Image (cartoon, helix red, strand yellow):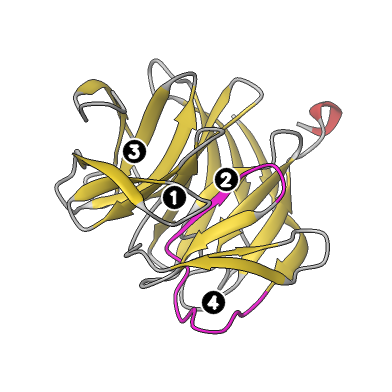
Amino acid sequence: MIESNAAIEREYGPFPEAEMVNGVTFDGEQVWFAAGAKLQAFDPKSGAPTRSLDVPCDAGTAFDGQHLFQLADDRIQKIDPRTGHVLGTIPAPGQGRDSGLTWAEGMLWVGQYRDRKIHCIDPETGKILRTIESNRFVTGVTWLEGELWHATWEGDESDLRRIDAQTGEVQERIVMPPGSMVSGLESDGRDRFYCGGGKSGKVRMVRRPKRGSR
């Protein structure tokens, strides 16, 4: 297994009305984060707030290219990002014990926090199609260039893990600095991760180690 220390390139926030960052996603232009009663967005180049939507958002966030998906209690909401309207809901697999959400190849991937699981589900029905086990609390899930990554936060320690999408075997760890807990994970599709900073109200940008150094 490859292991390295996280290189935090930038911190965003804390943002107004965001006492807690519960989930993070990236729509190609803006970074969205779940802050309890509002889904907020900022420009990752300037760090300036850009949008906010009044929807309940107490856990993971995802974007499929057109819609936002947002965990709220025991359900996943499908949201029109232009209007903030909730277009539909499906049951969350953990029935409220979920944390972490991402979209990949027509499916939603959902972290089930203290149960240490990651589910692949049908985005239309919520049916669980496959489950991967972890040995740490799961606090974020994302894909980057065909690699499945998840974040952990347990015992005041956090890391980002690249795992085998079939077996769950940990192939790489990026260890976060002490006190830099991860509550939500998303990639920029190239070589960076956006990490929710929990009660700090911040979002941190972490560089994926270069191939030659991994």
Residue 156 higher or lower than 85, as above or below: below
Quarter of the rendering containing residue 147 = top right
Q: Residues within 10 Å of mark 4 (few under 14, many from 20)?
A: many
Mark 2–mark 1 CB contact (< 8 Å): yes
Q: Earlier in the sequence, mark 1 or mark 3?
A: 1
Between discs 2 and 1, the one toward the N terminus:
1
Q: Do the residues labelled 2 and 3 touch (CB within 8 Å)?
A: no
Would residue 193 appear left or right of 212 to someone viewing this image? left
- Please say if the residues under marks 4 and 3 sit with CB atoms less than 8 Å apart: no
Q: Where is residue 87 in the image (x, y as percent from the top left)?
A: 32, 43
Q: Residues within 10 Å of mark 2 (few under 14, many from 20)?
A: many
Q: Give the label, 1 or 3, closer to the camera.
A: 1
Q: Quadrant of residue 144?
A: top right
Q: Is mark 1 on a helix, strand or loop?
A: strand
Q: Tag 4, which secondary structure?
A: loop
Residue located at (71% from left, 53% from top): 206
Q: Which residues are drawn in magenta?
A: 13-29
Q: Which disc is residue 110 wearing?
A: 3
* x 54%, y 76%: residue: 201
Which residue is label 4 attached to? 201
Quadrant (top left, top right, bottom left, bottom right) of the C terminus: top right
| Amino acid on which the number 2 mark rests in the picture | Glu
Front position among marks 2 and 1: 1
Instruction: Work out which quarter of the rendered image holds the N terminus and state it.
Output: top right
CA separation in Å, label 2 and label 3: 13 Å
Q: Which of 65 and 114 is in front in this view?
A: 65
Work out which residue is located at the far top of the displayed protein and give it. Answer: 166
User: Does the rendering let one see residue 137?
Assistant: no
Instruction: Say which amino acid is labelled 4.
Output: Gly
Magenta includes 28? Answer: yes
Residue located beneath label 2 in the image: 186
Q: Indicate which disc, 4 or 3, sits on the residue closer to the N terminus.
A: 3
